[in-house]
Each structure stands twice: as C-alpha cells, then as structure tokens.
Image (cartoon, grey):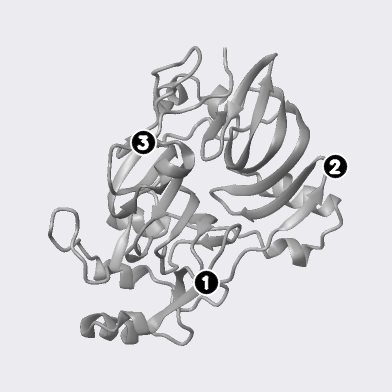
Amino acid sequence: MFYPMFFKPIYKENVWGGIKLNQLYNRKSPYEYTGENWDVAAHEKGMSIIENGEFEEKTLKEIMEKYPQEILGEELKDMEKFPLLIKLIHAEENLSVQVHPNDRYAMLYENGQLGKCEMWYVLHAKEGAKLVFGIKDGSTKEDFKKAIEKGQVKEYLKEIEVRRGDVLNIPAGRLHAIGAGIILVEVQQNSDLVYRVYDWGRLGLDGKPRELHVEKALDVINFKEDNSHKVQGLSIDLGEAKIKYLIANSYFAVEEIILKGSYVIKGYSKKFIIYTCIEGECTIIYKGEKYLLEMGRSVFMPAILEEWEIEGDVTLLKSYVPNIYEDFITPLKNFGYSDEEINRYVSIEHM
C-alpha cells in the first residue's frame, strides 16, 4: 500500500528569481522569475500533491492525517502539522536581508505559527558569489537600528564567498541573505515567517517596495552569535556509500550520501525520510518495484517502509526528524568520533 512517493513541483514567483531551475533540472515553471520550487511541503502557501502510485492526486496533508503512524512514524504520529519543508532556491539577484523567529516568538506574536530554523546546501555558485551570513562581530541592537534608519545596513553585514558543496546552518535569529548567482537546497521547519530588514532598494514584481519588518527583526536577531561558519560534517565510509553527517537539531537532521554502486537500507526506518538528488541519478528499489530519482528532485519515504535499495552514481541529501542520540550521535561514536567533534554539529533548539 505504501511506497516511495514523488510530488508535483510547487513553483514560486519571486522578484529575485530567474529561469535556471527550468534549465538545470528539467523543470516547467510558468514564471519568468522563478525563485523557489517547493519539493516537499504541507503548508497553507504550498501543498504537495502525490504524482505516482495508489495515492496519486492526494495531498501530503491528506495521507498524513489518515495514516499518521505509517507516514510519520511512531515518535511523530501525533504531530498536527508536517514538520519539514524542502525547497530548491535560485537567486538570480540578491534575496532580502532577513531573519526568522524561533518557536517561542512566533507562538506569541504570529498567532501560534512555527518559528524557522533552516540549512542550506549550495548546488551552484557563480565565481565570487557571496551570501550574507550573520552580523559583524561587536554589532549591537542599538547600532544596527541606527544603521537601518540611516540606510547603512550593508556596513554591518557579514558576507562569505561560497561554492558548490558548501553547507550553512541558519538557526532562528541569524541574519542572512542568499546572494546573486547561487542555487541551493533549503531544508527547514515548516514555516514561511520572514522578517526583512533590507531589500537593496528595489521594487517588487508589483512595482511597489516590498514590506520590511524592522521592529520584529530587531527583536529576534541574535547579536551575540559567534559560530557562523561553514559546516564541514563528519564522514563514515560504508564501502560503496560514504555518509557525511552535517547537521542535527531539534527539528531536522541532514546527511550527505555519496554513492557509487549499491546501498541497502535494512529494517524499518521508524520515521519518514526525504532523499533529494543533488548530483547524478539513482534507482530506488522497493518490493521489486523501481523508482527513478533524477537530479533536482526529492522522494518521500514513508515511515512504514521496510528495507529498500538505492543503486547509482549519485549524491543525495537525506533529511528527517531525528532522535538525535540514536540517529546522529551513536553512529558517529561507533566510528570513533569524540563527543567534542560530534557536538560541533548538534544543537538542541528551544522554544
């Protein structure tokens, strides 16, 4: 009854977008300025519709509500809202400089919505491409507020150059902006809350300035952060499959899988898994059926699935909601990593 599920793409028109998602990943967005493709989503602003198998044309929300344990897993079956949102983002131009609130702030000031922690995996970056990644050390709330009022925001932004394969962690409270010429995968909490503080002086697609959210942004920016650096990850070698553990927090974990050959996943996963193909392609074999996963697409593996095989020359991102000790810490300890090494990639976010 249950099987690997693919979803119809959800395209988003954005003033900073372009056409490269169509060009690189055989997409068919109708928009000239396509900034985002929501690959896996169950949000009021975008709902994934299944495009294969018995549940074709059903939404992710529908099957989650009807079969919560089979879809989400025992530990997550009581969730009222699907926990993750997976996107491909193309920034033809700079995104706005923005920040996201945590759960506590969103609950109090955004009618009970979720906050937003996210991570980025860079797929393409033009030479010299940069993004905003935090606020310069020593900046205070008062300094930054004055800079906004005087139009001097750029002087306070921490920018870093990126290239393909770079991984960045964006917890709630970290100021950020994807720079022009960058395509990336974003794994995030299921939220669309954005507080913009600066938009490069441009107009939106409607010819009007886009809304800024200065007061709320100042409330939630973390002016004390000192760990805004690229994520290196910790690798384990399983022969034909090499797994790099990238990020684990209270909301999601992400691993990179580089496969040259065959990789068998045995037993029940106990939780849903999302694979996003970022290079090459592969075949997922489940109960004798073959499912082709192409570059730039994601596949959803319900929690009830038992044992499958992945074949190909491919690089995948694996996203899921972790039991941090069981899914992330223990495998790394078994391969000899120390607590100090592991703790660099684990964070427990609080509401």
Q: Around disc 2, counting alpha carbons within 10 Å, would you say few (fewer than 14), some (14 to 19), or many (20 or more)?
A: few
Residue 168 vs 214, above or below: the answer is: above
Q: Is residue 49 left or right of residue 160?
A: left
Going 60% across and 26% down the picture, which residue do you hit? Answer: 292
Residue 279: which numbered mark, if any?
none
Q: Where 308 falls versus 206 (above or below)?
A: above
List x then y, in percent, for residue 173: 43, 66
Asked if one can make out residue 43 in the rendered structure from this viewpoint, the answer is no
Callout 1: few (<14), some (14-19), or many (20+) C-alpha neighbours within 10 Å?
some
Q: CA distance from mark 2 to mark 1?
A: 33 Å
Q: Are marks 2 and 1 in contact (CB under 8 Å)?
A: no
- Rendered image: mark on residue 161: 1
Lower sequence index among marks 2 and 3: 3
Q: CA distance from mark 1 to mark 3?
A: 29 Å
Nearest to N terminus: mark 2 or mark 1: 1
- Residue 203 percent coordinates (x, y): 18, 63
Q: Which residue is mark 3?
A: 10
Q: Quadrant of residue 154?
A: bottom left
Indicate the amino acid at tag 3: Ile
Q: Quadrant of residue 151?
A: bottom left
Report the residue marked by disc 2. Answer: 239
In the displayed structure, would residue 54 be above or below residue 175? above
Left or right: residue 31 versus residue 258 is left
Name the foreground residue: 245 vs 340.
245
Q: Looking at the picture, which amino acid does disc 2 mark?
A: Gly
Q: How many marks on residues?
A: 3
Q: Residues within 10 Å of mark 3 (few under 14, many from 20)?
A: some
Image position of 347 (left or right of 40): right
